[in-house]
């Protein structure tokens, strides 16, 4: 016995139902896409503004680790002046400067671990000093070294997955552009390769060569990949002029942070 043919109304509902479901799937997909897009865009904008140098709500730690020469405090002070102009949340640690917390190992790690950015905020850490091969960034206040592993652990606690930029200016600082510092949400710039010295730590200079090149490059671009390229070229020119052994500044651009 043949089945009775469905009414026109029922047939229309059957025909329209798959189309409606398809439209709903497209709408849901578009909603998810744009939601993801704007979340990434918001994070990216907050992150990119750090190169300008920081969004007003970003968390910032500046470290001048040695008091044997004024070049380190000069660089941290120059960055602090720019950041205060943008009302960023800045913690400055120094081995010598008045008005700054002492740049002991404990204080530096505590400051980084306490950054705690909110949604849409990022972290920016700048540290400049002498460096030791296979040791890290020298902190004269405690005659100790800030190591990549210790800094990574503090960043995990203090910044989590928030967009994070770390600049380490020291001899042999390329070790900071390696595991475990190389996480997806981070950008890391260093003044030299892990087996090379940087230069410019001498009386009569206002900044080290890398720090001067960084400060000048931040006046030109708000994109960290571009800043890094400008810094490398600037450092290379100075090395040629002074007959210095190439320091080979290093960088890491995490897949999430670099977008």
Image: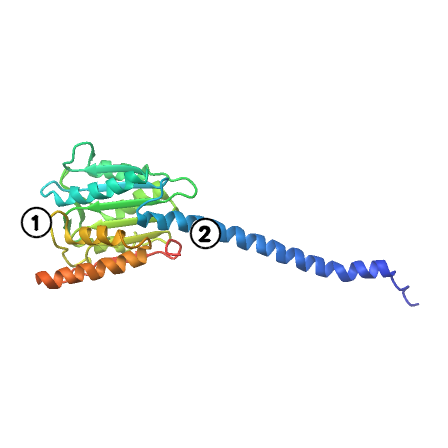
Q: Name the residue that disc number 1 marks.
A: 202
- For the C terminus, which image quadrant? bottom left
The single residue placed furthest to the bottom in the displayed view is: 2
User: Image point 15% across, 59% down: which residue?
Assistant: 196
Q: Can residue 245 be seen in this view?
A: no
Instruction: State if disc 2 and disc 1 touch (CB < 8 Å).
Output: no
Question: Which element carries disc 2, helix, strand or loop?
Answer: helix
- For the N terminus, which image quadrant? bottom right
Residue 179, located in which quarter of the rendered image?
bottom left
How crowded pointer 1 is (Cα within 10 Å; few <14, some 14-19, many 20+) is rated as few
Q: Left or right: 219 with respect to 8?
A: left
How crowded pointer 2 is (Cα within 10 Å; few <14, some 14-19, many 20+) is rated as some
The single residue placed furthest to the top in the displayed view is: 99
Q: Name the residue that disc number 2 marks.
A: 40
Residue 54, located in which quarter of the rendered image?
top left
User: Image point 40% across, 54% down: which residue?
Assistant: 256
User: Image point 35% across, 56% down: which residue?
Assistant: 254
Q: Can residue 42 be seen in this view?
A: yes
Q: Position of residue 67 (x, y in %)?
A: 12, 40
Mark 1 vs 2, N-terminal side: 2
Q: Position of residue 240 (x, y in %)?
A: 12, 64
Q: In this view, does 231 lie above or below 85?
A: below
């Amino acid at each position: 016995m043949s089945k009775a043919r469905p009414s026109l109304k029922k047939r229309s509902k059957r025909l329209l139902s798959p189309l409606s479901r398809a439209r709903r799937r497209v709408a849901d997909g578009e909603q998810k896409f744009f939601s993801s897009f704007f979340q990434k865009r918001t994070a990216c904008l907050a992150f990119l503004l750090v190169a300008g140098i920081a969004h007003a709500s970003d968390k910032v730690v500046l470290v001048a680790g040695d008091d044997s020469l004024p070049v380190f405090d000069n660089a941290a002070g120059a960055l602090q002046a720019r950041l205060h102009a943008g009302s960023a949340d800045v913690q400055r640690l120094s081995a010598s400067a008045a008005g700054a917390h002492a740049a002991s190992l404990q204080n530096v790690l505590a400051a980084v671990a306490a950054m705690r950015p909110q949604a849409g905020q990022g972290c920016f850490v700048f540290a400049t000093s002498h460096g030791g091969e296979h040791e890290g960034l020298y902190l004269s206040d405690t005659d100790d070294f800030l190591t990549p592993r210790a800094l990574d652990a503090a960043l995990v606690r203090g910044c989590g997955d928030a967009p994070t930029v770390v600049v380490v200016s020291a001899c042999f600082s390329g070790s900071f552009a390696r595991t475990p510092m190389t996480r997806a949400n981070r950008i890391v710039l260093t003044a030299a390769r892990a087996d090379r010295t940087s230069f410019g730590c001498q009386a009569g200079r206002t900044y080290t060569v890398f720090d001067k090149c960084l400060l000048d490059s931040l006046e030109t671009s708000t994109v960290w990949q571009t800043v890094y390229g400008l810094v490398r070229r600037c450092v290379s020119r100075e090395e040629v002029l002074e007959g210095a052994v190439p320091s080979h500044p290093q960088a890491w651009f995490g897949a999430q942070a670099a977008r």
